[in-house]
């Protein structure tokens, strides 16, 4: 596609529920990154994919968070047993080489009530 | 570990004037890249400018320039001739080496351009 697409743009869920956030990167971009941005903060790294594999998941806060990229294109961030502290904007970015030129999606605003 | 520090939570500038947004960084890598992104109220992160650590000249992209002072570990963004549409959050970021190229972001600076 022309840009990085993230769906849904907004998600409201109840505490304890499971959510999935989707990222569709630019076609051909092998590197994909997930970030979380809390209000008034900069993006915080969650996980990085190179192709189908998670090359670095050191930013995932706990085992409730998991992400996949089974075919090396679309990625899904999965959050189990959501907590109010998970409320944030989740950003996805992709890159052709990873060296520079990261393109971000518009993000998914997650609200846990 | 990499660290980005943006000490200005908010900046104000008159339309058509220049403004400098500060960014300092800390890294033990010899090779790294520095970025600036703009985030308007719509939420998307817009790439503005990139500076490689071995680039001898400061990067420029239209009205944006990056004042890179390697010895001081600073990478300030200069916006010339500010426009009302420049009002947004601005984030400084860096990426290291090692194959992952994972960017680390600062906390951002809010810029408001007054008419």
Image (tube, coloured by chain):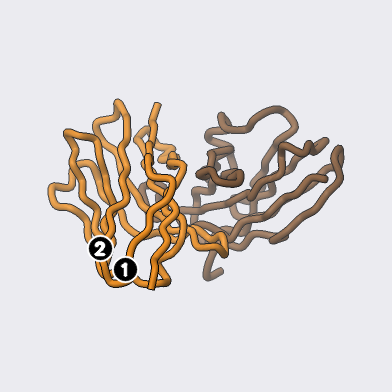
Chain colours: A brown, B orange
Q: Which residue is drawn at 49% across and 48% down?
A: A31
Q: Which chain carries label 1?
A: B
Q: Which secondary structure lies at badge 2?
A: loop
Say whether residue A91 is left or right of residue B102: right
Question: How far apart, in angstroms, are the residues tagged by discs 1 and 2?
Answer: 6 Å
Q: Quadrant of the N terminus of chain B?
A: top left
Q: From the top left corner, tell me how far across and down residue A4 is, in percent.
A: 56, 61
Marks 1, 2 in one chain: yes
Which chain letter goes with mark 2? B
Q: Name the residue under label 2.
A: B18
Q: In this view, does A13 lie above or below A5?
A: above
Question: Pointer 1: residues within 10 angstroms few (<14), some, or many (20+)?
Answer: many
Cβ–Cβ below 8 Å for labels 1 and 2?
yes
Q: To which residue does mark 1 refer?
A: B82
The residue lying at 35 percent from left, 50 percent from top is B35
Residue B80 rendering spot, x and y as whole percentages: 25, 65
The answer to whether residue B62 is seen in the rendering is no
Q: Nearer the viewer, residue A58 or B94?
A: B94
Which numbered dot is residue B107?
Answer: none
Q: Position of residue B89 (x, y in %)?
A: 46, 55
Query: Which quarter of the image is occupied by the C terminus of chain B?
Result: bottom left
The number of discs equals 2
């Amino acid at each position: 596609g022309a840009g990085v697409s993230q769906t849904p743009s907004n998600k409201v869920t109840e505490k304890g529920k499971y959510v999935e956030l989707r990222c569709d990167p630019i076609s051909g971009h092998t590197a994909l990154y997930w970030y979380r941005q809390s209000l008034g903060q900069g993006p915080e790294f969650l996980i990085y994919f190179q192709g189908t594999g998670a090359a670095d998941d050191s930013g995932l806060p706990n085992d409730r968070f998991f992400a996949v990229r089974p075919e090396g294109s679309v990625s899904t961030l999965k959050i189990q047993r959501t907590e109010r502290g998970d409320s944030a904007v989740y950003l996805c970015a992709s890159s052709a080489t990873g060296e520079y030129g990261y393109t971000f999606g518009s993000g998914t605003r997650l609200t846990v009530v | 570990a990499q660290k980005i520090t943006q000490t200005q939570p908010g900046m104000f500038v008159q339309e058509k004037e220049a403004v400098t947004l500060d960014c300092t960084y800390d890294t033990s890598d010899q090779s790294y890249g520095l970025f600036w992104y703009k985030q308007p109220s719509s939420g998307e992160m817009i790439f503005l400018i990139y500076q490689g650590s071995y680039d001898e000249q400061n990067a420029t992209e239209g009205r944006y320039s990056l004042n890179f002072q390697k010895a001081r570990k600073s990478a300030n963004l200069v916006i010339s001739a500010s426009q009302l549409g420049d009002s947004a959050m601005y984030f400084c970021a860096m990426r290291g080496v090692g194959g992952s190229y994972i960017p680390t972001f600062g906390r951002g600076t809010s810029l408001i351009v007054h008419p």
